[in-house]
Image (cartoon, rainbow, N blue to C red):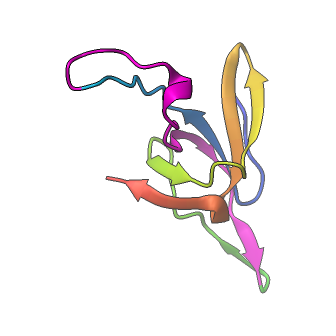
Amino acid sequence: MLKPLYDNVVLEKEEVENKTSSGIILNAADKDQPSIAKVVAVGDGKLTDGKKVPLQVKVNDRVVYKEYSATKIEYESKEYLIISEENILAVVE
């Protein structure tokens, strides 16, 4: 598994199926996909004034992130996103 460093977080993007209210499946290009993903790994935190500050997100959280701030990688035939915690906007509850 990937182990992110410092304040980085590994995300697994959720596949969203776009359907109309009548059940017609839309092509992904027809509508922007939301930037929601599941946290699969977190780093140890960042150093601030010599102190380690833990991350606010944890494994299995669903989060909203800035769309173009993540680095896409493929590892063991799965696609992941690596992103700094500061580019995560919210936790979905």
Give left or right: position of 25 versus 86.
Answer: left
- Residue 83 or 53: which is nearer the viewer? 83
Going by the image, does 6 lie left or right of 36?
right
Q: Is residue 39 magenta?
A: yes
Query: x, y percentage for residue 90?
Result: 46, 60
Position of residue 9 relative to residue 26, above or below, is below
> Residue 24: x percent and y percent?
30, 15
Please determine whether, in this image, residue 52 is positioned above or below residue 42: below
Q: Residue, x 40% and y 22% (percent of image)?
A: 17
Please report the residue visible at 73 percent of the width from the left and 40 percent of the height from the top: 3
**Residue at the spot 69% in from the left edge and 57% down from the top edge:** 44
> Is 71 on the left or on the right of 53, as rendered?
right
Front residue of this view, candidates 35 and 30: 30
Along the viewing direction, whichever of 73 and 24 lies nearer the viewer: 24
Whether residue 67 sits left or right of residue 75 in the image: it is: left
* Residue 27 is inside the magenta segment: yes
Q: Position of residue 91 (x, y in %)?
A: 43, 56
Residue at image x 73%, y 15%? 76
Residue at the left extreme, as displayed: 22
Quarter placement of the N terminus: top right
- Tell me which segment is drawn in magenta: 21-48
Residue 83 percent coordinates (x, y): 70, 50
User: On screen, 75 above or below 32?
Assistant: above
Tally of numbered tags: 0
Residue at the bottom extreme, as displayed: 49
